[in-house]
Image (cartoon, rainbow, N blue to C red):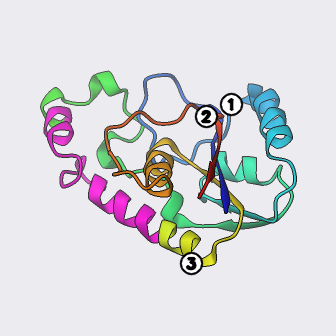
Amino acid sequence: MEITLIRHPPALIPPGVCYGRLDVPLRPDAAGTLARIVAEVGDVAAVFTSPARRCRAVAGMLPGTVREDARLLELDFGRWEGVAWDDVPRAELDTWARDPERCAPPGGESGGALLARVVSFHAELEAHRTDCVVISHGGPLKLLAALLARIPPDLLAPAPALGSVTRIRC
């Protein structure tokens, strides 16, 4: 089975702003990145995508049956959504970073909840054992990549680059 993981290109939001669940579109200059992604991916039968506009825009460019799956949404950062990271209270960030699995941003979702969603999605992929494309965000993709590679997921690991395409054979 080959799973192709795609992280959406840059979104239309100022740099340095937290935007996990904000439903922002792609930047207008994303056309070149979209064309590269389509060329790299080629023909596909099944596409799973986060319901976020920035991911659906990529899915809409690919052939194949597209299925939206809310388990592929980015972490819900609660009250931090739309706030510059520099303006998030330092004490809140430190608390969250010490235990991202159990701690959630105020009004948001814990890393453990994100991981549970991704584990559920991974189990479905494993059960169907079919080649597919998954379009999502940095948080879910880094966890899914680890699960597919059979290594422990790390909530604080670096996320794949915006606009990246990663193929994993499993």
Going by the numbered disc 3, the residue's amino acid type is Ala
Q: Residue at x 48, y 52 (%)?
A: 149
Toward which corner of the image does residue 109 lie, by quadrant?
Answer: bottom left
Q: Nearer the viewer, mark 3 or mark 2?
A: 3
Pinpoint residue 115: horizontal percent, then vertical percent. 36, 59
Residue tagged 1? 27
Q: Earlier in the sequence, mark 3 or mark 2?
A: 2
Q: Earlier in the sequence, mark 1 or mark 2?
A: 2
Q: Is residue 121 above or below residue 104?
A: below
For the C terminus, the quadrant is bottom right
Q: Is residue 87 above or below residue 108?
A: above
* Relative horizontal placement of residue 145, taking residue 111 as reference (left or right): right
Q: Considering the numbered disc 1 on the image, is that residue within a helix, a strand or a loop?
A: loop
Residue tagged 3? 127
How far apart marks 1 and 2 lie (CA) works out to 5 Å
What crowding class fits label 2: few (fewer than 14 Cα within 10 Å), some (14-19), or many (20 or more)? many
Q: Which residues are magenta?
A: 93-120
Please, which residue is most extreme toward the bottom here?
A: 127
Q: Considering the numbered disc 2 on the image, is that residue within a helix, a strand or a loop?
A: loop
Q: Nearer the viewer, mark 1 or mark 3?
A: 3
Q: Are marks 1 and 2 in contact (CB under 8 Å)?
A: yes
Q: Does 7 appear in magenta?
A: no
